[in-house]
Image: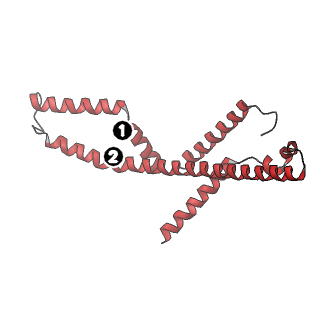
């Protein structure tokens, strides 16, 4: 952060960094993960719920009133079978999407932890330097010239390190 940079500029830069990280993670999805995410998004929407409710209502009305040949009379065993098939396929697909999102959240949480630990280390270093300056008679204004404290945390680089660590861990798990 340069001294002339405003808080709004810093916030905008941080938002851009987060957006880049999220785009990178989304772009790394496999074809199956993209399909699972699309299906989970569709099934979890109001248009799907309305469409499915209307279809079920129409199915029951047609079979109760007998306007068309009753292909599934009450208690609607064929309808129950169709809904069971839908649930059998939708459940694992939704779990696949949730597992990917959980991995994404885990990486984000680990990134937060890493940045918090770095901030804690920087604060500890600042306190040590301040104490050293006080004992040596050096004015505290000179602390801002310290190269250690002037370094910025590169969130993208940290996330890449975390992703590499996770990928290495998964390779070890599958080898065992």
Tell me the quarter of the image containing the N terminus: top right
Is 112 rendered above or below residue 171?
Answer: above
- Does 8 sit left or right of 112 as displayed? right
Q: Label 1 belongs to which residue? A: 43
Q: Residue shown at 84%/46% (left/top)?
A: 143
Quarter occupied by residue 167:
bottom right
| Res. 90 mark | 2
Is 118 rendered above or below residue 52?
Answer: below
Badge 2 local density, few (<14 within 10 Å), some, or many (20+)? Answer: some
Q: Nearer the viewer, residue 15 or 58?
A: 15
Badge 1 local density, few (<14 within 10 Å), some, or many (20+)? Answer: some
- Does 92 sit left or right of 145 as displayed? left
Looking at the image, is mark 1 or mark 2 earlier in the sequence?
Answer: 1
- Does 164 sit left or right of 41 as displayed? right
Task: Give SS at disc 1.
Answer: helix
**Can residue 14 be seen from the camera position used here?**
yes
Task: Give SS at disc 2.
Answer: helix
CB within 8 Å, label 1 to label 2:
yes
- Does 45 sit left or right of 63 as displayed? right
| Res. 145 mark | none
Residue 17 in percent (x, y) is at 66, 41
Q: Nearer the viewer, residue 141 or 74?
A: 141
Work out how far the residue at label 1 is from the one at label 2, CA to CA, in angstroms.
8 Å
Q: Nearer the viewer, residue 69 or 54?
A: 54
Residue 47 in percent (x, y) is at 35, 30
Q: Residue shown at 20%/29% (left/top)?
A: 58
Is 5 rendered above or below residue 136?
Answer: above
Residue 94 in percent (x, y) is at 38, 46
Residue 101 in percent (x, y) is at 48, 47
């Amino acid at each position: 952060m340069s001294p002339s940079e405003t808080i709004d500029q810093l916030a905008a830069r941080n938002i851009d960094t987060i957006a880049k990280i999220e785009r990178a993670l989304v772009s790394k999805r496999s074809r199956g993960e993209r399909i699972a995410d699309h299906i989970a998004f569709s099934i979890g929407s109001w248009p799907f719920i309305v469409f499915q409710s209307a279809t079920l209502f129409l199915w029951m009305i047609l079979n109760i009133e007998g306007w068309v040949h009753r292909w599934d009379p009450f208690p609607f065993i064929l309808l129950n079978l169709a809904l069971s098939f839908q649930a059998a396929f939708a459940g694992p697909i939704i779990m696949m999407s949730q597992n990917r999102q959980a991995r994404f959240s885990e990486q984000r949480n680990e990134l937060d932890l890493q940045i918090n630990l770095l901030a804690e280390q920087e604060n500890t270093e600042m306190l040590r330097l301040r104490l050293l300056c006080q004992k040596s008679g050096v004015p505290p204004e000179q602390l801002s010239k310290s190269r250690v404290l002037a370094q910025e945390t590169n969130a993208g680089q940290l996330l890449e390190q975390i992703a590499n660590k996770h990928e290495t861990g998964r390779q070890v798990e599958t080898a065992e």
